[in-house]
Amino acid sequence: MDKVQQRVITVALVVIALFALLFARLIYLQVFEYKKLGSISDTNSLRRIWEQAPRGRMIDRNGTIIVTNQPLYNIKVIPSEFNRESIGLMASLLEMEKEELEERIEKGRRYNRFAPSVVERDIEQHQMMRLNENLWQLPGVLIEVENKRKYTDSIRASHLLGYLSLISKQQLESMADKGYSPDDKTGSKGLEKSYEEVLRGEKGVRYELVNSIGRVVGKFEEGAKDQPFINGNDIHLTIDAGLQKVAEQELAKTEKPGAVVAINPRDGGILAMTSQPDYDLETLNGRTDREKWLAIAQDPRKPLFNRAIQATYPPGSVYKLLLAIAALEEDAISTSKKILCTGVFRLGRGRFLCHGGQGHGPVNMKEAIVESCNTYFYELIFDVGFEKWTEYGRMFGFGKTTGIDIPGERSAPLPSSDYYDKRYGKGKWTRGYLVSLAIGQGELNTTPLQLAAFTAAIANKGTYYQPHVVQGYRETGNGTYTDIEFSRKKLPVSESTLDFITESMEAVVERGTGRIARLDSVRIAGKTGTAQNPHGKDHAWFVAFAPVEDPSIAIAVLVENAGYGSSNAGPIARAMINYYVNGPEPAETDETTTEQTTTAQETSDETEREP
């Protein structure tokens, strides 16, 4: 037998083997699988239904559930199965315009006529029941039970928590490989966005057998091929819901825009954060009402703007603390040396006033901090030097973002020689620029979060923790808890310097410009500030930490257009410290607090005036 004949026989054997396999498969399907295949053929369709996983919950530091889930009913249509003659009936059952429904179905058809697409979200329960009773007349129509968020009634925390929105076309292009589809929602703001991957969970899938008119007649293979969804992981927050409530209520009393940030100085965890005006998360939960959304988006007060991490303001006299730290660490001055304050500081032809031109007389560093003497710090910045002033600002995190785990954080540049050279040109700016920087004015700007982190670093004797809102998360599948690590750094500042700053800040509250924040039951260290505002009334600052002997809370309060920090921002910090340190029940009588507030406000209005 020659080689040609061998090849022919080999090819023939391969062909016969292939046909034998195909014939065997045909016999198997016809004899052994005919019932199952016959069922599918009779019912005409095998439908795959994706099931959305409930998102993980958000739980505060005390175990209080702040965000959980509740049922949401969505209506989907498979265009290839839908009978156009049923549009009128379906529109009436959903209580919507026929033209609008038709447009939504057509939009789904253009995307994929074989895939279910949402035509109405978050319908009322009575609408769902009416539609369910008439599904036999509506082939291709599905009622899917998903989830929407359920928020606690005690707090709003809209800027912290964030909300969900429909995935955009641009997002889908980059996230389709992660299991997202056109009708999915994804975190849009706040923690919902930052921790999307942790919270979202995994979709499930089920297979249904439906007949020619779309009625479900059973499960495919008794559900053997179905895959259950996996809930998203719960995230555990550093937030104290009770303290958050106090912050929101106290800031709302001012009836002015502003922000409050409270930090645990022991680890950098955010205890409370509010920005006002804010907005109601329910407006954006489930189905978003267009008119209500436009009312929020077009509100001139900018309720979507998170002033705690996105708005920058001059820090005012609060920043004198940093200049004092730099001076002590660089041995530029002793704490006992006195500088004469006549009420006017002169530099060349310039005249810079101290509290309306009223002098404090000879003051040392502690007295200058307690009485918020501008003249002392006007002179001090020249002793320290611009480069060192900038260096210590960077050391404490100014001029850059803190890295908090909430999206959208902003920062302002920290003035330096290079900054001024680029902005004004080399040799075209003068030493006079430093006078304003000495008292936290001029081109220096900070966010409330930055000042809160700065205050916390003073409170804990020099450790700068990365601010964060989430402690960790618990995996749904196995219950494993995972801590999230955040950065920390020990600052090269001596403990003796920070002890002196703490003593001075405590004296501010005991007998200085911050007396309005004083509590008999708690030792509080604080500093007032007034940020000049070229567009209106000055902004009010107050930073504080307590208890002085073992700090557990550090706070920064900013009230826009409120004037002096002591009389407007101080009471907010006092109320929060009283709650957090002493507990929910007030530690002092209303009469004592009212008398103390009146006396302290009269004193602070006389002393906390800045140029």
Image: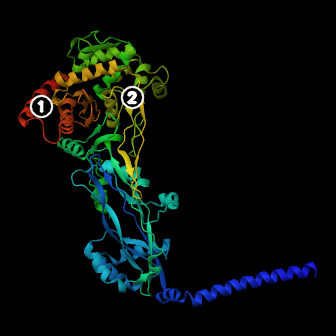
Q: Which image quadrant for residue 468?
A: top left
Q: Which image quadrant for residue 478?
A: bottom left
Q: Is residue 482 above or below residue 353?
A: below
Residue 300, given in percent of the width and then of the height, sits at 28, 48
Q: Which mark is residue 597?
A: 1
Residue type indicated by callout 1: Thr
**Which structural element holds mark 1?**
helix
Left or right? Give the position of 46 relative to 374: right
Q: What colouring does the structure picture have?
A: rainbow
Residue placed under numbered mark 2 in the picture: 396
Q: Which image quadrant for residue 127?
A: bottom left
Residue type indicated by callout 2: Phe
Image quadrant in which the N terminus is located: bottom right
Left or right? Give the position of 307 relative to 429: left
| Residue at the limit of the structure toward the right, as seen here | 2
| Residue at the limit of the structure toward the left, as seen here | 591
Residue 44, given in percent of the width and then of the height, sits at 48, 86
Viewer-closest of 342 and 587: 587
Residue at (27% x, 71% y) in the render: 124
Residue 219, given in percent of the width and then of the height, sits at 43, 80
Q: Is residue 89 visible?
A: yes
Q: Is residue 436 above or below residue 261?
A: above
Q: Earlier in the sequence, mark 2 or mark 1?
A: 2
Left or right? Give the position of 53 relative to 14: left
The residue carrying pointer 1 sits among few (fewer than 14), some (14 to 19) or many (20 or more) residues within 10 Å by Cα, namely: some
Measure the alpha-carbon separation of dots 2 and 1.
32 Å
Image quadrant in which the C terminus is located: top left
Residue 5, given in percent of the width and then of the height, sits at 90, 82
Viewer-closest of 315 and 300: 315
Viewer-closest of 244 and 121: 244
**Which structural element holds mark 2?**
loop
